[in-house]
Amino acid sequence: MAEWVGREILPHERDLRTWLRSRVMAAADVEDIVQECYCRIAQITDVSHIAEPRAYLFAMARNLAHRQRRRARVVRIEPIAQKEDNELASDLPLPDRIAAGRQELDRVRAALGTLSDRARRIFLLRRIDGLSQKEIAARLGVTEAVVENDASRSLRAILRILTEPSDAASPAEEGRAHVRSR
Amino acid sequence: MSDRVEQAAAEWALRHPLDTAGAAALEAWLAEDPAHAGALLRAMAGLSLVDQAIAPPRADLADEPPPPSRLRRRLLAGAGAALAASITGLFGWQYWRAQHVETARGEIRRLPLADGSVAMINTDSALSVALERDIRRVSLDHGQAWFQVAKDRARPFVVDAGIALVRAVGTAFSVERRDQGVEIAVTEGSVAVWAADASGAMTIIEAGQFARFHAGATAPVVGTAPAAITRALAWRSGEIALENETVASAVAQFNRYNRQQLVVEDSQLARERLIGLFQIDKPGDFAATLAASFDAQVIATPQEIRVTRKNVDRR
């Protein structure tokens, strides 16, 4: 399951955040919706029916945004259904999608490159040698707490790199949102 | 997602295997707030990407276009069902006990693996094998082994030789780990190799090529030498193949396999070059050939076989 989410959902989180932000949503609301999406996916027992995970994710987020809007009783001017079709569709042909998957792994590798040597070594020992944190701590001659702290902070840093809309992308997106809201 | 929840989720994702107390603590944490399950899933998804980036389950070797098959989907669906069945199902990692194998001096062992692969383990070597659901892992602690890998795209075959790693899907290659470094030689297909210190930069080498890693170097020295590779692997059939190699290097090779050590002290004789195929466990035959070819004499004891030149060293 985690593997499927890593391959099919997580790589779209950045676009999802950009999209949600482009709808003039407060940062906290974007965060809530993203979080709620993962909660719902955690409850899914069978992913075999999800042929288009990206579209599924965006549709789920859109529904949540609707709901949140009603609850907030703030009527926004922007028509919700406006550009969903081209946002939802992942119209890349299969080879391109495979290439995109590889690009994603390249980004993860680049993110790994930003870590300290020790943090990188921890992930390698974990993956390649299948060692537990305790065994890794013994191998590296540090306490288990150090390993846990290093690894968890590094994992979060990688997640941030993968899912935060880049600075280059967001002004354009905000610009579009601005134009639309006028 | 609050900082605190995200941090806790990352810690839980990394904490495995969980003992009973750990599993109970996780369940308690998940019960605190429905948001926790989502945060944990996201952290685990991120970790799975990190794992794949380190050792991809799908080869990005040129001959591997991997469409997600129906079977794969069904397997994923199965994983999802396990998740629903129990919260601790989230942590349904499968652990297989690693198999440890060591060879003594002179022992050459053929080890068939459960997945259909075969490891030929050279003299004085140690390795461990763990076949998991999504990866086949071999740790080469020291020495040398040649692997004939059964094709299984869903489960890459990764050999960890300390400073360097190799990943294959269905090929044949050897890995030699010495104090001076690690050498990988491919006899069939292609493999990806990378330095443990490098952040993911891989080199693809093909049949007939070798890659040498020295400690501290992030990239290997790569070369093409099909004949030399085949010759160097003659040990698999219990032979030593010499093609213009020095007596000294032949002696060193024999001595890795036999308790009865060859000794050639004459430096001139040690520099002579040889061509021939010898049985690995018969250093006496080799010494006799030397004696005949270079006008030398052989003095054998149970511990050693001393080869001396008659005209240089008279005793």
Image: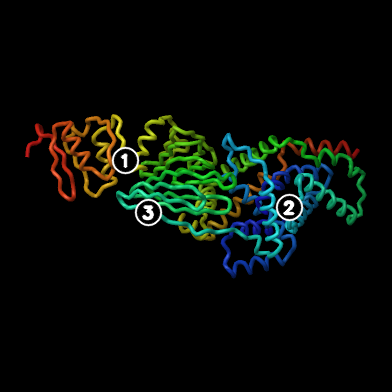
- Report, in whole angstroms, how far the alpha carbon at label 3 lies from the one at label 1: 20 Å
Q: Quadrant for the N terminus of chain B, please.
A: bottom right
* Residue at 67% over, 49% down: B71
Percent of width and height locating residue B206: 49, 33
| Chain under callout 1 | B
Are discs 1 and 2 located on one and the same chain? Answer: no
Residue that badge 3 annotates: B102
Question: Residue at label 1?
Answer: B239
* Closest to the observer, A107 or B148: B148
At 10% from the left and 36% from the top, the residue drawn is B313
Q: Which residue is mark 2?
A: A47
Compared across the picture, whether B104 is left or right of A40 comes to: left
Residue B259 spot, x, y in % from top left: 24, 50
Residue sitting nearer the eye, B292 or B142: B292
Q: Nearer the viewer, residue B24 or B96?
A: B96
Instruction: Calculate the distance from the C-alpha at mark 2 to the C-alpha at mark 3.
Output: 44 Å
Q: Amino acid at mark 1?
A: Glu
